[in-house]
Image: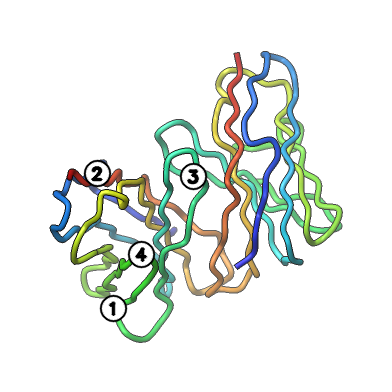
Amino acid sequence: AQSVAQPEDQVNVAEGNPLTVKCTYSVSGNPYLFWYVQYPNRGLQFLLKYITGDNLVKGSYGFEAEFNKSQTSFHLKKPSALVSDSALYFCAVRDGSSASKIIFGSGTRLSIRP
Amino acid sequence: SAVISQKPSRDICQRGTSLTIQCQVDSQVTMMFWYRQQPGQSLTLIATANQGSEATYESGFVIDKFPISRPNLTFSTLTVSNMSPEDSSIYLCSVGTGTNTDTQYFGPGTRLTVL
């Protein structure tokens, strides 16, 4: 069965510093990995995904994520955080062996202080 | 990506009543899904809305409680029946192509409070 873990409920970073939001996964086939962001009182917005190819995936708003097969991780990163990046971030995974449903992690609340 | 709208955006309802949530997409989509997000928690898939046939429900969700309609490729409704305070959640519609590499896109959500 597929699963995804976000070990940190909250991440606090000062504006201008680099940020990392962690995600690890477990699937039986090839993983298809996604990051979404949810701003207050809004739906989920797609940030980026890894399907195949380059392990470093670039997405919206300056975010990127690195796929690491040996560590089964897909951490979200940004070189320089903005206060406007403060939101709830969800990692998600789909087992690539079939058109199966997406499983979401528990979410990490990112707080950027000025 | 598709533009997805939901109605209502929020509602406050009394225990024992029902609420129907609408999801409208600006283009034809293969797959439509309904999720629930309880306060401070992750998303849980309720069901996949199938066009022209009965919805496919996930474990723990039943048609009598969450009847779903999908009359065409751009529209779906989710009804939350006989509501209780435990049904207070955000309900999200999402769409996709149904392929392995597919990205699902989400509507803005409906925030439901049951008193």
Q: Residues within 10 Å of mark 1 (few under 14, many from 20)?
A: few
A48 vs B22: above or below = below
User: Do discs 2 and 4 share a chain?
Assistant: yes
Task: Identify the residue at image location x=62%, y=44%.
Answer: B46
On the rendered structure, is B5 left or right of A15? right
On the rendered structure, is A65 left or right of B5? left
Residue annotated with mark 3:
B43
Q: Earlier in the sequence, mark 1 or mark 4?
A: 1
On the rendered structure, is B45 left or right of A48? right
Q: Mark on residue B105? A: none
Q: Mark on residue A56? A: 1
Q: Nearer the viewer, mark 2 or mark 3?
A: 2
Q: How is the image coloured?
A: rainbow
The span from disc 2 to disc 4 (Cα, nearest Å) is 16 Å
Q: Earlier in the sequence, mark 2 or mark 1?
A: 1
Q: Residues within 10 Å of mark 2 (few under 14, many from 20)?
A: many
Residue type, numbered disc 3:
Leu
Residue annotated with mark 2:
A111
**At which x and y percent is residue B32?**
68, 57
Q: Nearer the viewer, residue A82 or B98?
A: A82
Residue annotated with mark 4:
A61
B82 vs A31: above or below = above
Q: Residue furthest bottom?
A: A53
Task: Identify the residue at image location x=39%, y=74%.
Answer: A50
**At which x and y percent is residue B66?**
71, 35
Q: Residues within 10 Å of mark 4 (few under 14, many from 20)?
A: few
Secondary structure found at label 4: helix
